[in-house]
Amino acid sequence: MNLLGDLRDFNCDPLAAMERAAARPSHLLHMGPIAVRLVVEPAAVYTILTSASNAIGRDAIALAAARKLLGTGIATTEFAEHREHRQAIKSAFAQRVIAEHEAVVQSEADRVFAEYGVPLKRRLEQFAIRVTARLLLGSDIEDTARIESATNEFHTSMRTEFRSPIQAVLPDWLPTRVKGATRRAKRELRIAVNEVLAGSHPTGSDVPSLMARFPNSTPELVASQTTNLLVAGATTTVPFLEWMLRHLSQRPDLVSGLQADFENASGRIIRETLRLTPPAWLVGRQAREAVDTPALKAHKGEFLYLSPYLTHRSAEYWERPTEFVPERWTDGFEDALPRGAYFPFAAGSHACLGGGIVYMEGRAILRALLNYWPDRARIEHDGFIPDPGFTLGAAGQTMLIKV
Ligand code: HEM
């Protein structure tokens, strides 16, 4: 018997390994000693995220790995503890509050394309970090180098720990390469967050500063909550924006739609990018209690992987599933989908709080791009090869080249 099961395959090419496992009658992926069930069917996905969420928590292995690095915060807690975190900060994400910062977000987006021929990934990282720090933490930071490096270290560490459940249970002090990366990520994140917290905080009641939301909290809690938000905001937005630029490179014909009706056309482009290349490609869960519903049966302790990447590309629910077709998002299209067929931001008690920010960022980048593309510049990139780490990146570089 192969003790590693699918682990080696998963490490080499996680998307292909998941696709193969999803095609098996058992839907099981054998991650070494741990069997994980891939749940692709929308009704079961929706049940896990919503009505069964009192019995189904986060994937305990990934949670432990994330908690080591991010500390205690909204993205690393569950059940009653998580509800308290969510309650404390959710008003900072209200549409009305976010909308006040539209001009700042636009001016940051305009900076992304300030130079031709430079890798845009780094520019997008700076953009995402500045927007998250400003909108949620009331902090203005010009020099983002430390946070960029910290979030990249986080990404590397999570990728290794997550792809090897054995690593995740080994102690962090072990003098190995993987554990060295974890220690570095932890250290870098701590330093970077202290910089954000020390950044200039424009005063005024309109700034939804996280600090103001925890009047009685300890400095540790504020620091870890800040880490949670910075990582949640930056690690997902960068791949989303980079994928959007790459998809657009194939479709200069979309410009006329954007010029005629920016709001609707941009919404369709954003939705389709999040369908075809969802940054949160894997959402891990684990049943803390047995679940027995018509849509889902799970035994206590069972690991369940939900994959927007797989469900969004299933030919059972989508026409031309592997093509970029923003036109499919006509009025009423999303409402007609089976619940759980489209879940780039998950759903239910852990649904992403940053959706409004993502749409604002996506639209700001599209507006900035329209000053150049396609008449004055074209988008060049290394193709459509996904790079699945903690989030679903795009392999290689993307650039804006003068024409
Ligand atoms: C395209 C970009 C984004 C995508 C695809 C995305 C996706 C997701 C997903 C799938 C979850 C649920 C994870 C789970 O249930 O295990 C989540 C949670 C979360 N996201 Fe996002 N996200 C994005 C951007 C953002 C941004 C910009 C922020 C702002 C800081 C943000 C803040 C959060 C927070 C705070 C949570 C935790 C919610 C909770 O557990 O209650 N996200 N996100």
Image (spheres, rainbow, N blue to C red):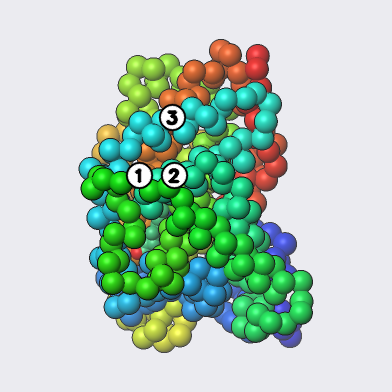
Residue tagged 3 = 107
Q: Percent x, y for residue 276?
A: 50, 44
- For label 3, the crowd category at 10 Å Cα-Cα, with few meaning under 14, some 14 to 19 and many 20 or more, is some
Residue drawn at x 45%, y 66% as measured from the top left: 223
Q: On screen, 48 above or below 291?
A: above
Residue tagged 2 = 140
Separation of residues labelled 3 and 1 (CA atoms)? 17 Å
Residue tagged 1 = 202
Please, what is the three-letter code of the amino acid marked with disc 2? Asp
Q: Residue furthest right?
A: 176
- Nearest-to-viewer mark from 3 and 2: 2
Q: Could you say whether the residue bearing mark 3 is in a helix, strand or loop?
A: helix
Q: Percent x, y for residue 240?
A: 51, 44
Foreground residue among 107 and 290 = 107
Foreground residue among 32 and 65 = 65
For this view, does 3 lie left or right of residue 132? right
How many discs mark residues in the rendered view?
3
Q: Percent x, y for residue 363?
A: 40, 32
Residue drawn at x 29%, y 51% as measured from the top left: 208
Say whether residue 29 is visible: yes
